[in-house]
Amino acid sequence: MEKKSRILIVGATGKLGFEIAKASLQASHPTYALVRDSAFSDPLKSLKLQTLSDSGATLLKGSLQDETSLIEAIKQVDVVICAVSSKQVLDQKLLIAAIKQAGCIKRLIPSEFGLDPSKARISGLDHNFYSRKAEIRHLVEAEGIPHTYICCNYFMSYLLPSIVQPGLKTPPRDKFTIFGNGNVKGVFMKESDVAAFTISAVDDPRTLNKAVHLRPQGNVYSMNELVELWESKIGKKLEKIYVPEEELLKKIKETPYPDNMDMVFIYGAFVKGDQTYFDIESPGGVDGTKLYPRLKYTTISQYLDTFVRVLPYQ
C-alpha cells in the first residue's frame, strides 16, 4: 500500500481547518498543525488543539508572518493545506515563498473553499473578495507549485440556517424573500463533508493541478426550490416577496461594506448563477462527487430537518 502523505494544516483551529485536521487523522495521514502562540491562550482554540493532539496530531509553533517557522514546518511534510479565513488570504504569499524555498512539497491546497474565483462575475461589488483568491492562484501557478483547488461553494453554516434570508438567524415562518426570478441555483456543502473530499484529493493524481468542484445532487437548489422544500417540511405556505435584480443591486450599493456582503454573495450565486453556470469538467476542473462516490454527504434537505425538529411550528 502506498505511503500516506504527511499533511500540514494551516488554520487548524478555524471551523473548516479543524474539520480538515480531524478528517486527515481519521484517514491515517501523519497530521501536523501550524499554531500561533496566541492560540494556546484562547480557550476554544486551546480545546481544539488539545483534541487534535490527543488524536495524534503534531502541533508546530509558527505563523504566516514568520518565514523561518514556515520553512521548518514545511520541511517535515509532503502536503500543505491552508484553511485560513478570507481576511487572511493574501497572508499566504509568504507561505508560497516558503514552499518554493523548501522545495519538498508534493502539493499545496490553498485557502479557497468557496466559489471558484475564476468563475465569479460580480467584479466591482465584492470588495476584491474573489480577486484576492485569484491573485493567490496566479502566484501558486507562476511559482510552479503543484496544487489542488477545492471549490465547495457555500458552507451550510452560512446563509442556509435562514434559508438565504438576510437578517434572519433561523428559517422564516411567514414571509420568504426571493432574489431575482428564483430559478437560479446555488450550492451548499457541510464543512465536515468538504473536509472529507479535501483529504480524499490529497494523494489523488487525478486532482493534481486541478480545481475540484463539489456540486453534489441534493445540494444544488434554486430559491424557489428552497422555499418549496421548507414549506413541505413545516406544512405551511409562506408569502413570497420577489426582489428584482435591479432592486437588489440598488440595496447592495446603498448598504455600507461589510454589511452588504451577504447580499453580494446572494447576488453572485442566486441571480448571476456564478456557482452553477459552467460545466465542472471544462478544462482544469474535476467533479469531486464523481471521483469519490463512496463519500457520504449531508444534503440540504437533511440539514433543514434539524430546524424542523427544534422550531415550534404549531
Image (tube, grey):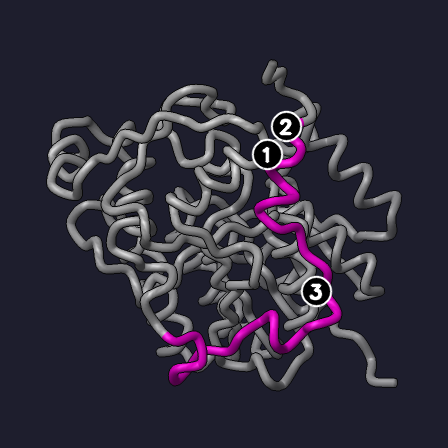
Highlighted magenta segment, given as a residue range: 279-308
**Label 3 residue SS:** strand
**Amino acid marked by disc 1:** Lys
Per the image, is 306 magenta?
A: yes
* Label ID, residue 308: 2
Determine whether 149 is above or below 175 in the image. Answer: below
Picture quadrant where residue 311 is located? top right
Which residue corresponds to mark 3? 7
Q: Position of residue 275 (x, y in %)?
A: 37, 59
Q: Position of residue 214 (x, y in %)?
A: 53, 64
**Amino acid marked by disc 3:** Ile
Front tag of 1 and 3: 1
Q: Residue at x 19, y 45 (%)?
A: 125
Front tag of 2 and 1: 1
* Label ID, residue 233: 1
Instruction: Note whether residue 41 is visible.
Output: no
Front tag of 2 and 3: 2
Per the image, is 66 magenta?
A: no
